[in-house]
Amino acid sequence: MSVTDEVIATNQPYAQNFTLGNLALPPARKLAVVACMDARLTVEPVLGLKTGDAHIIRNAGGIVTDDVLRSLILSHHLLGTQEFIVINHTDCGMLTFRDEDLQAKLETETGAAPTVPSRFFAFSDLEKNVRQQVRRIQSHPWIPKKIPVRGFVYDVKTGRLQEVAAAQARRKAG
Ligand SMILES: [Zn+2]
């Protein structure tokens, strides 16, 4: 039995006990979260969110790509979310390589040089990466300035979230 078969098999008892069929389409707590796909980070319990509460947008690194912006813009304008959170985490796989090395390796191994993905968005500084993602969201002209966008690092060893101060506040403080 493949893992896919195993996990699909658990859907049957899940559906038998299902009670969430009447949730509204817009997220109840008007929140959207951008987070890394890391398997050790389960966003809902970390933030005390229930099904129907928030949009959770995940990818490798919790990077604000074009597609994440697409989702956030839809999340706010069509589905009414009013606050955004970005979550990266300690020990992220994106800290372990460089884009150009992986690209070269894959090209060598496969003999193909596809145009997508154009980048992997590996990074070497966790907090700097969080700040960059927050800025990407804040600076988009279709995302209203009144929307709070806050960035956090999740510690996979302790379960704690640490807020990443904005770059400007940091400079003033230092
Ligand atoms: Zn990660």
Image (tube, grey):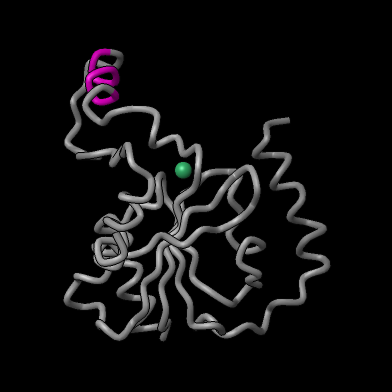
| Quadrant of residue 74 within the rendered picture | bottom left
| Quadrant of residue 20 within the rendered picture | bottom right
Q: Which x, y percent locates residue 52?
A: 60, 76
- Asked whether 11 or 81 is in front, the reply is 81
Q: Residue at x 36, y 83 (%)?
A: 78
Q: Is residue 19 above or below residue 131?
A: below
Q: Residue at x 42, y 79 (%)?
A: 83
Which contiguous range is marked in magenta? 102-108
Q: Which x, y percent locates residue 147?
A: 34, 81
Image quadrant containing the N terminus: top right
Image quadrant containing the C terminus: bottom left
Main SS of residues in magenta: helix
Q: Which x, y percent locates residue 154?
A: 53, 52
Q: Is residue 94 above or below residue 65?
A: above
Q: Residue at x 24, y 13 (%)?
A: 108
Residue 115 located left or right of residue 149: left
- Asked whether 89 or 63 is in front, the reply is 89
Does the magenta run of residues contain 103? yes
Q: Which x, y percent locates residue 40?
A: 61, 44
Does the magenta run of residues contain 144? no
Q: Residue at x 32, y 49 (%)?
A: 129
- Asked whether 23 or 41 is in front, the reply is 41
Which residue reaches farthest front? 174
